[in-house]
């Protein structure tokens, strides 16, 4: 018999269900060693360049909101093993996400369009079961009010890293946040509640607590043990089961008599008549006239934000302390430093680098000796070599990283490209003892047909040079300890871009 034709609607529904199941499986992926992916680095650079949004802020809030996992599917854990409804790297609630897309969807589509005059490619919004055209259709439908917060496809779109990064920018723009702490607070609580918190943290109530204490227990309330009735399993269709409250071997006390020999004490149950109960531990109590309820979802889902002792939940911050705590959590004072830690370079973009990396001809700073042919060296200001990338160099960085991703080479590698090895030699970090200016001849290994000569990072000198390069440019080591001696894709691109800059300088620099 001929094969039965596939119903397109059923096939589409099955695809969505498989993707939903995948999102559910990965929602608890809290592994902090899964660092930001090269494709995510490329997207953030694109978004910052197109919007003018602070690149360091995008990185810092993404790292914090995703609990340092950069997992597109992560969701916050709640009490009882449940998961919160926020999702994605920037933890958007369904209603917040729908509102941003409804109000600013047109701007999102314009920002992701191609712009040949500025050298911008069209951003591909495809992800998971959605192609680029389908994502854009979802955005237009939401703008027209045809999709609401409960729409399945719109909810799944929160796992789309590119869309969510732009939504993060649009939400910050909508809230009017003026600094990184306000930006995070308004995203976390909403603009109205965030402004209330700022008012409390900066006003007369700044030393009151952020969370109300739990209510004191009522000492007169009967407990299950004192009720004098048996507690039974009342599930329908099942026989009644007595739930044993006393430990095995317990023998009831006769009033006025001592415990029988061999009887096991059951604390308060075996007190003699007239004997005082043990002193009750005093419950913590503190002034919190404007605090959140101790059992509100915003508190229970973010204990580390509101309590000094985290999950202990016994010592909440004051409003002033909460603001200082948030500054530390979002790394407000070192967000641009995070750019170099992830990319290996700085960018001439808002929040793209720390001021001390900028090259000032009036105060050039210390020199670095570049290796030339033979045994020659050329001293140049280090800041001139490592300064933030220009717009042209930024596009070069983007093209090189995009090429690695397209070629399937966007994974940490145990070998260096020829260009990367030569730059390490130029910088004086990988200097052959007796091979002149050819690092390949000194450190390369013959990997056989199809591979040729390869410089591997397992060589002690190469490994040392790679670590020295990270320290020189402000790049952090991989989050995964097993990859500490491997070359990350961003590091390879950074080395090649620095190499191109050095060659341009040498081509215009007269030297003997």
Image (cartoon, rainbow, N blue to C red):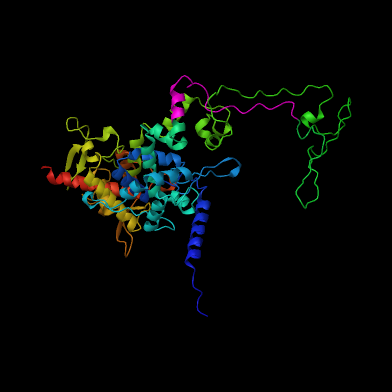
- Magenta: main secondary structure: loop
Residue 128 placement (x, y as % from top left): 43, 56
290 or 490: nearer the viewer = 290
In magenta, the rendered stretch is: 195-221
Residue 164 placement (x, y as % from top left): 40, 46
171 or 225: nearer the viewer = 171
State which quadrant residue 294 falls in: top right
252 or 449: nearer the viewer = 252
Q: Magenta includes 202?
A: yes
- The C terminus - image quarter: top left
How many discs appear?
0
Q: Is residue 145 left or right of residue 17?
A: left
Q: Is residue 148 left or right of residue 287?
A: left
Q: Mark yes or no: residue 126 visible.
A: no
Q: Magenta includes 232?
A: no
Residue 329 placement (x, y as % from top left): 44, 33
State which quadrant residue 410 falls in: bottom left
State which quadrant residue 190 falls in: top left
């Amino acid at each position: 018999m001929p094969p039965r034709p596939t119903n397109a609607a059923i096939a589409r529904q099955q695809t969505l269900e498989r993707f939903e199941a995948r999102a559910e499986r990965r929602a608890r992926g809290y592994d902090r060693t899964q660092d930001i992916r090269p494709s995510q680095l490329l997207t953030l650079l694109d978004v910052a360049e197109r919007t003018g949004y602070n690149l360091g802020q995008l990185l810092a809030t993404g790292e914090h909101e995703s609990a340092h996992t950069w997992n597109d599917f992560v969701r916050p854990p709640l009490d009882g093993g449940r998961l919160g409804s926020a999702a994605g790297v920037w933890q958007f609630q369904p209603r917040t996400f729908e509102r941003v897309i409804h109000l600013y969807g047109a701007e999102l589509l314009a920002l992701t369009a191609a712009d040949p005059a500025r050298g911008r490619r069209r951003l591909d919004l495809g992800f998971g079961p959605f192609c680029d055209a389908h994502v854009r259709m979802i955005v237009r439908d939401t703008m027209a009010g045809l999709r609401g917060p409960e729409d399945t496809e719109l909810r799944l779109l929160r796992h789309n890293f590119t869309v969510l990064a732009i939504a993060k920018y649009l939400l910050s723009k909508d809230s009017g946040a003026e600094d990184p702490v306000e930006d995070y607070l308004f995203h976390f609580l909403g603009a109205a509640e965030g402004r209330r918190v700022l008012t409390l943290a900066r006003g007369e109530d700044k030393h009151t607590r952020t969370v109300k204490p739990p209510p004191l227990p009522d000492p007169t309330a009967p407990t299950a043990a004192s009720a004098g009735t048996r507690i039974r399993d009342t599930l329908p269709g099942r026989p009644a089961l007595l739930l044993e409250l006393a430990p095995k071997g317990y023998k009831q006390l006769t009033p006025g008599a001592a415990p029988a020999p061999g009887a096991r004490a059951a604390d308060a149950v075996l007190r003699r008549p007239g004997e005082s109960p043990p002193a009750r531990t005093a419950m913590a109590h503190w002034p919190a006239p404007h605090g959140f309820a101790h059992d509100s979802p915003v508190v229970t889902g973010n204990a580390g934000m509101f309590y000094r002792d985290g999950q202990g939940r016994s010592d909440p911050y004051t409003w002033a302390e909460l603001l200082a705590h948030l500054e530390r959590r979002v790394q407000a004072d070192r967000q641009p430093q995070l750019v170099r830690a992830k990319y290996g370079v700085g960018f001439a973009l808002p929040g793209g680098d720390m001021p001390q990396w900028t090259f000032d001809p009036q105060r050039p700073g210390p020199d670095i000796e570049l290796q030339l042919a033979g045994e020659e060296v050329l001293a140049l200001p280090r800041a001139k070599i490592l300064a933030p990338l220009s717009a042209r160099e930024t596009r070069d960085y983007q093209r090189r990283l995009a090429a690695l991703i397209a070629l399937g080479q966007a994974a940490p590698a145990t070998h260096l490209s020829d260009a990367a090895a030569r730059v390490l030699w130029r910088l004086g970090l990988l200097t052959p003892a007796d091979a002149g200016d050819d690092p390949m001849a000194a450190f390369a290994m013959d990997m056989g047909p199809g591979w040729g000569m390869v410089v591997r990072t397992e060589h002690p000198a190469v490994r040392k040079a790679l670590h020295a390069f990270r320290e020189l440019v402000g790049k952090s080591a991989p989050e995964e300890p097993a990859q500490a001696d491997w070359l990350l894709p961003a590091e390879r691109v950074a080395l090649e871009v620095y190499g191109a800059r050095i060659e341009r300088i040498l081509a215009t620099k007269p030297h003997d």
